[in-house]
Image: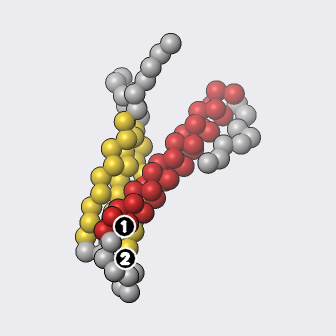
Amino acid sequence: MTTKTWTVNLVLDEQGDDTYADAVLDVGKGEEKWLKGRGFSRKHPRDEAAPRIGDELAAARALSDLAHQLLGVAAEDIERKTHTPPRSLSL
């Protein structure tokens, strides 16, 4: 059995009412492949300040973006290997 560790670093940057998030996937030693998902949230002017909610939204959006990119890479790899587009890869 082989165990692999993939690491996702999630960086949040708050700028006023805006929160930006980057989710970076590092697939480990010997691999040069990494992907970066991006997310963003903005507090509505009428909402009370709740920075944690902005962090959660931006982080979720960055991770969702990363997941979609990873599915795209998997689809490309499947097609390259089988010479047939994959039928169903969805979240």
How was this image coloured?
secondary structure
Q: Label 2 amino acid?
A: Lys
Helix, strand or loop status at disc 2: loop
**Residue that mark 2 sits on:** 43
Which residue sits at x=69%, y=27%? 82
The residue closer to the viewer here, 41 or 73, is: 41
Residue found at the very far bottom of the displayed protein = 46
Helix, strand or loop status at disc 1: helix
Which residue sits at x=61%, y=48%? 91
Percent x, y of residue 13: 27, 61
Mark 1 or mark 2, which is nearer the start of the sequence? Answer: 2
Could you tell me if residue 6 is visible in this image?
yes
- The 10 Å Cα crowd at callout 1, few under 14, some 14 to 19, many 20 or more, is many
Q: Label 1 amino acid?
A: Gly
The correct choice, above or below, for 38 with respect to 49 in the image is: above
- The 10 Å Cα crowd at callout 2, few under 14, some 14 to 19, many 20 or more, is some
Q: Which image quadrant for residue 83?
A: top right
**Residue that mark 1 sits on:** 54
